[in-house]
Image (spheres, rainbow, N blue to C red):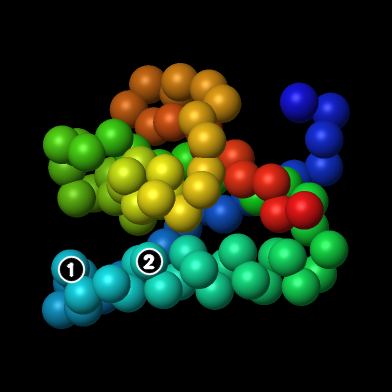
Amino acid sequence: MDDEDVWSLVCLSVHVTARGQGVATALLESAIDHARARGVRILEAYPVREGHHVIDSFTGYLPMFLAAGFEPVRDAGRRVVVRRSLV
């Protein structure tokens, strides 16, 4: 697994006034489409588990990634490393 080439999605910045309106999900879907269009085989991200402070949430929350087809591959403390195959 770790010898695979991956693209990393490290930040989803959503203005405070736009939170809770599906903006992060739309950004994630666009990132998936962008990566797939460029031939990326694996997309990786580092979301936080629910219940952590908003200061940690710039990487997104785990349930959003799970709903988008990502799978947990490694526990990283308050974050979880998730991957999605794009092929």
* Residue contact at pointers 2 and 1, CB within 8 angstroms: no
How many C-alpha atoms fall within 10 Å of the one at disc 2: few (<14), some, or many (≥20)?
some
For marks 2 and 1, give the CA distance: 10 Å
Which residue is drawn at the image coordinates 50% and 30% (left, top)?
A: 72
Left or right, 50 with reference to 30: left
Residue 26 in the image: x percent, y percent?
41, 73
Question: In terms of sequence position, does the residue under pointer 2 or pointer 1 come before the other?
Answer: 1
The secondary element bearing badge 2 is classed as: helix
Q: Quick check: 37 above or below 62?
A: below
Kindly identify which residue carries mark 1: 20
Left or right, 45 with reference to 80: right
Residue type highlighted by circle 1: Gly
Q: Quick check: 6 above or below 18?
A: above
Q: Quick check: 10 above or below 23?
A: above
Query: Do we see residue 83 in this rendering?
Result: yes
Which residue is drawn at the image coordinates 53% and 22% (left, top)?
A: 74
Report which quarter residue 77 is drawn in: top left
Image quarter in which the N terminus is found: top right
Residue 56 in the image: x percent, y percent?
28, 44
Query: Do we see residue 7 in this rendering?
Result: no
The secondary element bearing badge 1 is classed as: loop
Task: Indicate which disc residue 25 carries.
Answer: 2
Residue 50 in the image: x percent, y percent?
22, 38
Residue type highlighted by circle 2: Thr
Residue 12 in the image: x percent, y percent?
42, 63
Task: Indicate which disc residue 73 carries.
Answer: none
